[in-house]
Image: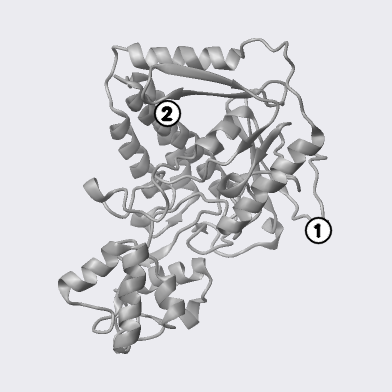
């Protein structure tokens, strides 16, 4: 990107020692959201048993942030309510069996907190905090046919859950299903995190479009919405008929990136591995930016310390080397996640209220405030994040007239 206009992209082949400069008059980012920012539910070998794909590292977000695109709603994290340990879906049980959320005393608590996704997570957290855990979906006593339907359904979409039921002989008809929240994710298709886009899905960088989980301000669009956004963006590109200037020379950004590849691949100052610094990053986000261990809550002092520690870890990435292109990929996954972590922390701190329990639980400002019934947006300028509030638009179409 130069002069706030897209020029293409750079990257590398993970099996061959080849780097690429890809020139384009328009680019659609569809790289998905960000997992792996926070310490996961399960440690060690099972750390990638999570709700969101572990290979979605926030690369698309990081590219936009670094290019100076305006981003939105990173404080509106997504936390899924799942079957404990297996991280299998709960919706099939809650909706298909009409199972209620109950605590260890057998009390139905979902009616007290609400039944939106964030409220279902928040209610479970609160009941555990109050000493009423563990929490469950009440399935004990369902009939054999319904139980068999559940076993088949989970064998199809989350086989580890069915295998666990059968292995322990604790099938859902015999025992309630224990539930818990996941670690937080940044996902624009479920919440609103991502690029600040216009009606045609163009970002504030001319020629750069976003669709799916990277497209912000449009929550709960899911798969069909993501497909629609991709088509909307493509049609706008065709309509505008953008053409690449054949006089473009090699992008200075591309040259700088290729030099960075060489430094990491040929470096001899390795002190840390990407995995070690990734674990350090996840520990910081978990403890200081509202992860599982602190019940998704945070305060301003914690966020400030978290920001400092993320910046320290970012500096330490200078001392990572890669022996091949596959390891180089791991290094860049870490670098991308660290960029997104900075934005998440900045957004969490800027919203001086609690608008979505658990998703965004600010202990310094525990109630909602209509002054913040707006989007929290950010732009990176000279390495620093500049934040602002934007009104929720009422018009049928939106263009970037004030950037």
Percent coordinates x, y for residue 301 in the rendering: 46, 46
Percent coordinates x, y for residue 37 in the rendering: 41, 44
Find numbered disc 1 in the image and state the secondary structure of the residue it sits on. Answer: loop
- Asked whether the viewer can see residue 174, the reply is yes
170 is higher (above) or lower (below) than 74: below
Locate the C terminus by quadrant. top right
Find numbered disc 2 in the image and state the secondary structure of the residue it sits on. Answer: helix
- Asked whether the viewer can see residue 403, the reply is no
Q: Which of 27 and 348 is in front in this view?
A: 27
Count the marks: how many?
A: 2
Q: In this view, does 165 lie to the left or right of 342?
A: left
Circle 2: is it few (<14), some (14-19), or many (20+) Cα within 10 Å? some
Locate the N terminus by quadrant. top right
Q: Which of 38 and 323 is in front in this view?
A: 323
Residue at (43% x, 46% y) in the render: 35
Q: Nearer the viewer, residue 249 or 127?
A: 249
Q: How far apart are marks 2 and 1 (CA)?
A: 39 Å
Percent coordinates x, y for residue 41 in the rendering: 31, 55
Circle 1: is it few (<14), some (14-19), or many (20+) Cα within 10 Å? few
Q: Which of 341 and 346 is in front in this view?
A: 341
320 is higher (above) or lower (below) than 358: above
Q: Mark 1 — residue?
A: 394
Q: Which of marks 2 and 1 is in front?
A: 2
């Amino acid at each position: 990107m130069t002069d706030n206009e897209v020029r293409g992209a750079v990257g590398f082949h993970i099996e061959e020692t080849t780097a690429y400069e890809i020139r384009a008059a328009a680019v659609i980012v569809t790289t998905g959201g960000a997992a792996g920012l926070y310490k996961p539910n399960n440690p060690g070998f099972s750390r990638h048993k999570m709700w969101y794909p572990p290979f979605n590292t926030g690369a698309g977000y990081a590219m936009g942030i670094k290019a100076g695109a305006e981003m939105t709603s990173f404080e509106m994290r997504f936390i899924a309510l799942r079957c404990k340990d297996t991280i299998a879906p709960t919706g099939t049980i809650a909706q298909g069996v009409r199972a209620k959320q109950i605590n260890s005393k057998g009390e139905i608590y979902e009616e007290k907190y609400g039944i939106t996704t964030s409220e279902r997570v928040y209610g479970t957290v609160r009941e555990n905090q109050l000493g009423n855990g563990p929490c469950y979906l009440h399935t004990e006593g369902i009939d054999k046919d319904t139980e068999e339907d559940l076993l088949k359904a989970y064998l199809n979409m989350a086989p580890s859950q069915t295998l666990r039921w059968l292995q322990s002989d604790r099938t859902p008809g015999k025992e309630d299903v224990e539930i818990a929240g996941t670690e937080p994710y940044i996902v624009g298709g479920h919440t609103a995190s991502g690029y600040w886009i216009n009606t045609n899905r163009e970002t504030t960088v001319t020629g750069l479009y976003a669709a799916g989980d990277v497209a912000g301000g449009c929550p709960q669009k899911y798969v069909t919405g993501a497909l629609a956004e991709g088509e909307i963006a493509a049609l706008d590109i065709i309509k505008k008929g953008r053409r690449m200037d054949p006089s473009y020379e090699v992008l200075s950004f591309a040259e700088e990136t290729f030099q960075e590849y060489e430094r990491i691949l040929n470096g001899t100052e390795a002190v840390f591995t990407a995995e070690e610094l990734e674990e350090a990053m996840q520990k910081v986000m978990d403890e200081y930016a509202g992860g599982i261990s602190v019940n998704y809550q945070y305060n301003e002092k914690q966020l400030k310390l978290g920001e400092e520690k993320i910046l320290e870890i970012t500096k330490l990435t200078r001392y990572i080397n890669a022996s091949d292109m596959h390891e180089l990929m791991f290094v860049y996954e870490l670098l991308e996640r660290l960029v997104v972590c900075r934005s998440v922390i900045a957004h969490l701190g800027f919203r001086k209220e609690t608008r979505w329990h658990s998703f965004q639980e600010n202990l310094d400002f525990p109630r909602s405030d209509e002054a913040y019934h707006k989007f929290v947006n950010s732009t990176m300028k000279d390495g620093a994040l500049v934040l602002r509030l934007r009104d929720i638009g009422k018009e049928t179409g939106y263009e970037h007239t004030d950037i």
